[in-house]
Image (spheres, rainbow, N blue to C red):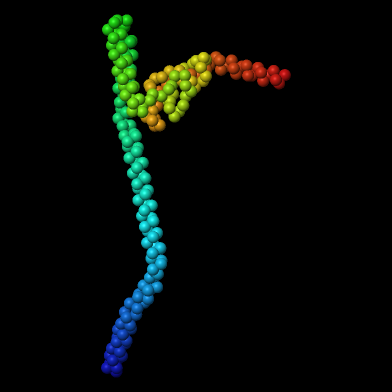
């Protein structure tokens, strides 16, 4: 009995080994059939290659355009940061001029007049250099407040101007071509409180008269 059981086990093991071998043999055949099925026709391969080449050329053209744009901007606005920092020199000149004009110890003296003349010459020369490099001051006084160009720092009562008109320039603003280098710091006009109250009363009286 034991011999028969041993023989049966050996036969079963041989069957399993043969089954595994058959599977291994079939696997390459199945893979080969799939590869044959996935193979493209020459026309399809050519179409794919054309599509890849077209995509590559489109990407190269986009990169070229980006490079040209960056190059132009670097040429046009390369000195933008430098120009903005240089504006501090103009501010310092203006502050120095105001300080000297308010100094009572040298007021109305020839020395002060000559010094102010030299400061004005330096200031004009700097403005001229800026203009040669397409840097222009922003118009402010008597202009309507433009949030894109001006920054309102305070309001001043002035009935002679329309509300929101710039009546004082605290710090001059500049443009570099079509870009804002820095905004003008300004004071704008507003109507007096008394006038507003009178206008309100007048409007109320007009409403009452209409009702009556």
Res. 116 image quadrant: top left
Instruction: Please tell me whether residue 13 is drawn above or below residue 149 in the rendered image.
Output: below
- Choose between 53 and 21: the one closer to the eye: 53
x then y, percent, for residue 75: 32, 36
Residue 105 visible to an observer of this rendering: no
**Quarter of the picture holding the C terminus:** top right
Q: Residue at x 34, y 22 (%)?
A: 127
**Residue that protrudes farthest toward the top in the picture:** 109
Q: Residue at x 56, y 15 (%)?
A: 195
**Quarter of the picture holding the N terminus:** bottom left
Instruction: Please tell me whether residue 136 is drawn above or below residue 95 in the rendered image.
Output: below
Q: Residue at x 30, y 30 (%)?
A: 82
x then y, percent, for residue 96: 30, 15
Tell me if 166 is positioned left or right of 121 in this view. Answer: right
Tell me if 204 is positioned left or right of 183 in this view. Answer: right
Q: Residue at x 40, y 26 (%)?
A: 183
Residue 75 visible to an observer of this rendering: yes
Instruction: Please tell me whether residue 168 is drawn above or below residue 75 in the rendered image.
Output: above
Res. 78 image quadrant: top left
| Count of labels in the image | 0
x then y, percent, for residue 94: 33, 17
Tell me if 188 is positioned left or right of 102 in this view. Answer: right
Res. 42 image quadrant: bottom left
**Residue that protrudes farthest toward the right in the picture:** 212
């Amino acid at each position: 009995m034991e011999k028969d059981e041993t023989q049966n086990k050996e036969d079963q093991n041989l069957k399993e080994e043969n089954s595994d071998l058959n599977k291994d043999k079939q696997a390459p055949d199945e893979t080969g059939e799939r590869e044959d099925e996935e193979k493209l026709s020459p026309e399809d391969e050519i179409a794919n290659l054309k599509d890849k080449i077209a995509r590559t050329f489109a990407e190269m053209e986009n990169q070229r355009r980006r490079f040209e744009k960056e190059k132009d901007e670097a040429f046009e606005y390369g000195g933008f940061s430098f120009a903005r920092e240089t504006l501090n020199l103009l501010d310092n000149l203006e502050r120095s001029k105001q300080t000297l004009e308010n100094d009572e110890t040298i007021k109305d003296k020839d020395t002060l007049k000559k010094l102010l003349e030299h400061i004005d010459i330096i200031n004009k020369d700097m403005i001229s250099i800026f203009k040669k490099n397409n840097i222009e001051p922003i118009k402010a006084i008597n202009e309507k407040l433009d949030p894109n160009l001006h920054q309102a720092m305070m309001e001043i009562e002035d009935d002679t101007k329309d509300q929101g008109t710039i009546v004082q320039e605290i710090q001059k603003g500049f443009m570099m071509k079509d870009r804002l280098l820095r905004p003008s710091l300004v004071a704008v006009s507003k109507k007096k409180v008394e006038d507003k109250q009178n206008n309100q009363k007048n409007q109320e009286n007009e409403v009452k008269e209409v009702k009556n």
